Amino acid sequence: MATKTSVEKKSKRTCYSVVIVPQYEGRAHQFKVSRFVIYSVITAIVLFVSSFAVVLTQNVRLRNTVAQYTGMGLDQVVRLQSAQLDAANETISNNNTELAALRKYVAYLGTLDATVRKTLGVGGSSVSLASILKSSATPTLSVSRGLAAGATQLSTSTAVVQQEAQAREKNLIILQDAASKYNTMLAETPSLWPLYGLITSDYGWRSDPFGGSGSEFHDGVDIAAPYGTAIRATAEGKVEQSGWNGSYGISVTLYHRDGIETLYGHMCRTAVSAGQTVKKGQVIGYEGSTGRATGPHVHYEVMIHGSSVNPMTYLD
């Protein structure tokens, strides 16, 4: 009896009854729950709440850390893009200055090229100024399309202009050299009239002007004009002879180039001396009738390597 009572007391101390009573009708239910189970449930709840609190705290800290690093990264990106923008703007400014200078240079070369070609009497051009300016158009930069790409495009455009300008300059140097040689050749080639007047005797065979029965070969042309008319050099050259020259009377002989010489005879006086360099159109003497002459005129003669040729082929 004592044992049974002791067991019941012990059971009362270690167990609890849980009664579930319906609100309106139905039978109530009773459950016995040991103290160990209750303590276990409470412990589990406490552990769950503690763990949740720890996780929540760590999550907040992690979010704050991520937000901090994210802000730092964004700030670095902004600074980097700002630096890239400054560098691109500086590159663009420098390239625009170079491009503007190159455009002026190319335009100058184009004008000079046209002048040289006009002098040479040729047309066409291996380099088109319009194509140069078209290929060197300044690109429009956009951040969305990339700063580096825009700056590179502008640098490439400048390089294209430089290459085209160098090609034009090389071509122009060749043309300048050709124009210089061509102009020198023209200046040293007889082409002017020594004076304007009436041709009284042509080049070739003619009757003796002094009334003889025979004929003679006239190695020049006689041009008559009022006594004392200025006689001009028909080409640039050097005075080989100036003064009395036999049947030519007072005459001047000029050497021009490649064996070409001109002789001006029957002057009344000369205006140049031997060894002097004269320009095309320069006055070298004055018309007279010295030597074997029938009246005032100039005997104009063209010689190539010592042999006379028809002067009319050289007169404009």
Image: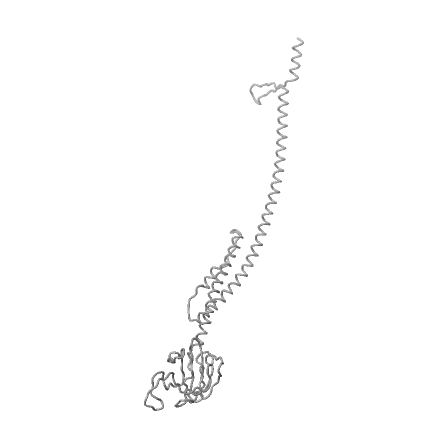
Apparent side of residue 167 relative to residue 54 in the rendered image (left or right): left
Quarter-of-image position of residue 220: bottom left
In the rendered image, residue 16, in percent from the top left (x then y), is placed at 63, 19
User: Which color scheme is applied?
Assistant: one colour
Quarter-of-image position of residue 89: bottom right
Q: Quadrant of the C terminus?
A: bottom left
- The answer to whether 290 is drawn above or below residue 102 in the figure is below
Q: Report the front residue among 295 and 253.
A: 253
Q: Residue furthest bottom?
A: 211
Apparent side of residue 112 relative to residue 73 in the rendered image (left or right): left
- The answer to whether 19 is drawn above or below residue 80 in the figure is above
Q: Residue furthest top?
A: 1
In the rendered image, residue 214, in percent from the top left (x then y), is placed at 32, 88
- The answer to whether 188 is drawn above or below residue 130 in the figure is below
Q: Report the front residue among 169 and 144.
A: 169
In the rendered image, residue 212, in percent from the top left (x then y), is placed at 34, 90
